[in-house]
Image (cartoon, rainbow, N blue to C red):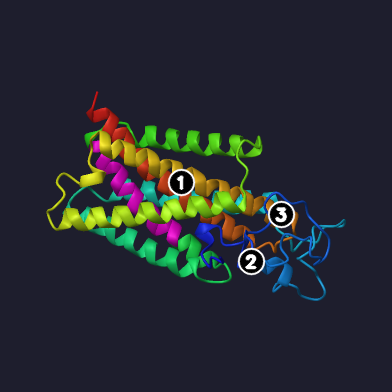
Amino acid sequence: MRSSNPVFSRRGFSRDNGYAGFNTAPQAGYAQGNPYAQNPYAQNPYAQGGVQYGAPPQAPVTTDRMTMDDVVVRSAITLGVVALGAVLAWALLPVTVVGLGLAFGAGFVAFVLAMVQSFKRTPSPALILGYAAFEGVFLGVVSEMYNSRWQGAPFQAVLGTMAVAGATLLVYKAGWIRVTARYARVGIAIAMAFMVVLAVNLLLVVLGVAQNGGLRSFGPLGALVGIVAILLGAFFLTLDFKHIEDGIAYGAPRNESWFAAFGLTVHLVWIYLEMLRLVAIFTNND
């Protein structure tokens, strides 16, 4: 199964063995033992002038290969644009019909830009940063709306998102979660089923069949659904971490770090929005 969507861990999928590269050590060249033998890195569409990205880095390391510094810098830039957009939107757009209309319009534009980037074979910094800017506007107004009713909810949601991301990274680095082919397939199947259920729930709410938001209510059932959504966000973060780890190990090109930043941003935003709802639900029940 090959995914063309970097949000669902673009690199590493193959038709033959699911999520390639998991639990295998780097191998030189394109030998059969190379976990990227059925992977875009092994087929090496990035090779220019004899540089072989399909092989793990050898000293001296070329400057065209992705490093952890590249991932950190580009992720910081992308998340910084989201934060800047949110701060400006919070300060300049009131929580009114017009403000909410602009916010949801920005959210729709962000979704379109994310989908366009998701199905591109190469990362576009302009698309990724454009997504981050519009997503920031959406988050700013939504956060302001929550804060007006549940004082301090956005701050708690930010702390909760950081806690989930930090705990997920700790668990991943400690080896308590093994990102295997089976793990990826099962997790993505659950996520797809979850999204279908939410889509059906939204349809039922629009038709008036489900009351008070249905599964997305601000009651115990809504809290349970929110927790499941946060766990799925953490699952996708583990795929992001594996993507980054394998990309560095096997000499992915430097621009692949934009894909890594994009995936991390999308999933952190997902977790933040679910955390925001969860804070509101628990505040209501106090």
Residue extending farthest left? 208
79 w.r.t. 257: above or below: above
Q: Does residue 273 belong to the magenta stretch?
A: no
Residue extending farthest right? 59
Which of the two discs, 3 and 1, labels the residue nearer the N terminus? 1
Q: Secondary structure at mark 1?
A: helix
Which residue is label 2 attached to?
16
Residue extending farthest bottom? 49
Which of the two discs, 1 and 2, labels the residue nearer the N terminus? 2
Q: Position of residue 52 (x, y in %)?
A: 80, 68
What amino acid does circle 1 point to?
Gly
Q: Quadrant of the C terminus?
A: top left
Q: Position of residue 225 (x, y in %)?
A: 33, 41
Q: Residue at x 36, y 43 (%)?
A: 274
The label shown at residue 77 is none
Locate residue 16 relative to residue 141 in the image: left or right: right
Which residue is label 1 attached to?
233
Q: Does residue 144 belong to the magenta stretch?
A: yes
Which of the two discs, 3 and 2, labels the residue nearer the N terminus? 2
Q: Determine the main secondary structure of the stretch shown in magenta.
A: helix
Front residue of this view, candidates 210 and 87: 210
Which residue is label 3 attached to?
248
Q: Residue at x 83, y 61 (%)?
A: 28
What amino acid does circle 2 point to?
Asp
Locate residue 70 relative to residue 201 in the image: left or right: right
Front residue of this view, candidates 5 and 257: 5
**Is residue 81 shown to the viewer in this render?**
no
The mark closer to the camera, 1 or 2, is: 2
* Residue bounds of the magenta highlight: 131-148
